[in-house]
Image (tube, grey):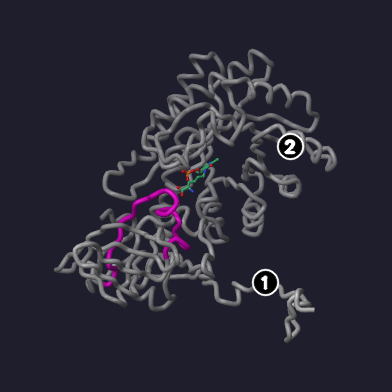
């Protein structure tokens, strides 16, 4: 078990986070419960700020798809990071949190007209343009609104990151960005020059997520800097900004060996500098877009154990009160997690169990074959490293209300996302007048 941040075992043999006893958190706020360690979240922001911004003047842009709400946005702002948003909803959240719009980057491979208009109205710092349709639309909208759109072009560098198939993004066969290899990217640069309301500021790429091999980033930096030079040579445009995306991996499970954020910064910035010299172009301003490595380790999820089904010599299923609805990653990517019995951290008897969710879905398994102190109904199970892509990917399948989220620090626990109730589930349901009659007649029964 990799206890990170303020997570520890207290004198009651309970799991503690942010100096809060998790058993008390579960009883006060109910379960399932997302718990965010404010100290670790801020420490991770600071580690990035120190390694990239203080050391090299690079900009760190928190990827809000990882986890976003008013409290998270506020902390990101306070820690001096910028924000990457990929939808009108994320943008609206940032605006409501009064996030400075100049520090917002708007991503997405299919932004709608309304989303683009909203981003222009808010005057976001950079639009990260993914395709020609968007470029044309953006130019037209900016013209109508009498503003200029400051953009970066998202490029597909053809770099394969060694990670799960579904979270790779930099390879050529991908829905994201302009492909460099086949000339699409250069055509896009040329198109920008024809468009009156577009100001091309830089290039962007993102090669994937949960990446441990820093060499993949060096490769991407090489391809991108080569393109900076080529674009300059072919069009006379010398961009001054290079956004190399996010993707830095974290520890989830034994065998995961993340490098330090400082190493990541040193290697990446050295690569950009070397390549600038090699390709004879000025060193651009560098940006990175971490998400998982800031929020992931800072979150845990608490569940209460309900039914336990023991199939002798085969498997013992321990069912909890959440599952794929609050953490779809094991079902989607076969992601592995570590967990503990939060109310009995050091148990004598250890047994192998599998932790199941409560959805009507055989694939709703959180953890297969984990060794835990003998688990009983009513125990609190804590799953680690759930801060990233859990709440943000949660759903209401089986009409399960989404859990609450608390922010803990130095013994204080504040609710930052309220638990959904049944009324929330019906909030958007409408009953047409013709169904309201107490006698519902079938169309055929005339
Ligand atoms: C464009 C872009 N930037 C940044 C990120 C953040 O990645 P991560 O959470 O792996 O750091 C993602 C997600 O993969 C992304 O698609
Ligand atoms: N949602 C993915 C990673 C983010 C992909 C975004 N480009 C995960 O949970 O690992």
Element type at mark 1: loop
Check contact, mark 1 vs mark 2: CB within 8 A: no
Task: Check disc 1: other Cα within 10 Å, few if <14, some if 14-19, many if 20+.
Answer: few
Q: Is residue 216 left or right of residue 113?
A: left
Quarter of the image that includes the C terminus: bottom right
**Residue 42 visible in the snapshot:** no
Residue 316 is tagged as none
Which residue matches tag 2?
Answer: 149
- Specify the farthest residue to the bottom: 438
Q: Nearer the viewer, mark 1 or mark 2?
A: 1
Question: Closest to the observer: 286 or 165?
Answer: 165
- Specify the farthest residue to the left: 348
Which residue matches tag 1?
Answer: 429
**Residue 125 visible in the snapshot:** yes
* Count of marks overlaid on the render: 2
* Span shown in magenta: 323-343
Q: Is residue 203 above or below residue 121?
A: above
Q: Is residue 135 above or below residue 379?
A: above
**Residue at horizontal 46 percent and vertical 37 percent from the top:** 52
Q: Is residue 242 left or right of residue 409?
A: right
Percent of width and height locating residue 179: 59, 26
Task: Check disc 2: other Cα within 10 Å, few if <14, some if 14-19, many if 20+.
Answer: many
Percent of width and height locating residue 33: 43, 68
In three-dimensional space, the C-alpha distance between marks 1 and 2, rounded to whole angstroms, equals 38 Å
Percent of width and height locating residue 43: 41, 51
Question: Closest to the observer: 201 or 341?
Answer: 341
């Amino acid at each position: 078990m990799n206890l990170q941040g303020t997570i520890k075992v207290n004198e009651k043999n309970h799991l503690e986070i942010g100096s809060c006893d998790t058993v008390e958190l579960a009883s006060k706020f109910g379960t399932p419960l997302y718990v965010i360690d404010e100290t670790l979240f801020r420490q991770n922001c600071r580690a990035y700020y120190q390694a990239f911004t203080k050391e090299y003047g690079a900009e760190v842009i928190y990827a809000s798809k990882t986890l976003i709400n008013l409290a998270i946005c506020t902390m990101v702002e306070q820690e001096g990071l910028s924000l990457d948003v990929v939808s009108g909803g994320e943008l609206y959240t940032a605006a409501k949190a009064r996030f400075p719009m100049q520090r917002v980057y708007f991503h997405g491979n299919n932004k709608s007209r309304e989303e683009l208009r909203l981003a222009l109205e808010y005057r976001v710092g950079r639009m990260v343009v993914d395709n020609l349709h968007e470029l044309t639309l953006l130019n037209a909208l900016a013209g109508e609104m009498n503003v200029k759109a400051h953009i970066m072009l998202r490029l597909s560098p053809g770099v394969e990151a060694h990670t799960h198939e579904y979270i790779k993004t930099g390879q050529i066969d991908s829905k994201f960005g302009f492909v460099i290899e086949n000339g699409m990217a250069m055509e896009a640069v040329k198109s920008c020059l024809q468009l009156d309301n577009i100001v091309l500021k830089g290039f962007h790429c993102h090669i994937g997520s949960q990446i441990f091999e820093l060499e993949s980033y060096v490769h991407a930096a090489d391809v991108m800097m080569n393109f900076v030079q080529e674009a300059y040579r072919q069009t006379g445009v010398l961009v001054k900004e290079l956004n190399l995306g996010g993707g830095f991996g974290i520890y989830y499970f034994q065998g995961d060996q993340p490098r330090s954020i400082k190493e990541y910064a040193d290697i990446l910035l050295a690569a950009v500098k070397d390549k600038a010299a090699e390709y004879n172009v000025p060193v651009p301003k560098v940006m990175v877009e971490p998400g998982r490595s800031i929020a992931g380790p800072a979150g845990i999820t608490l569940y209460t154990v309900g039914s336990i089904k023991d199939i002798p010599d085969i498997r013992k299923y321990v069912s909890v009160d959440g599952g794929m609805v609050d953490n779809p990653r094991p079902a989607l990517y076969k992601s592995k997690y570590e967990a503990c019995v939060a109310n009995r951290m050091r148990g004598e008897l250890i047994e192998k169990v599998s932790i199941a969710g409560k959805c009507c879905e055989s694939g709703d398994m959180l953890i297969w074959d984990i060794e835990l102190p003998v688990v009983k109904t009513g125990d609190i199970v804590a799953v680690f490293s759930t801060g990233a892509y859990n709440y943000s990917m949660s759903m209401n399948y089986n009409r399960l209300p989404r859990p609450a989220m608390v922010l803990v620090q130095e013994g204080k626990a504040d609710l930052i996302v309220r638990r959904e109730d049944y009324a929330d589930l019906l909030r958007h349901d409408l009953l047409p007048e013709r169904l309201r009659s107490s006698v519902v007649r079938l169309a055929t029964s005339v």
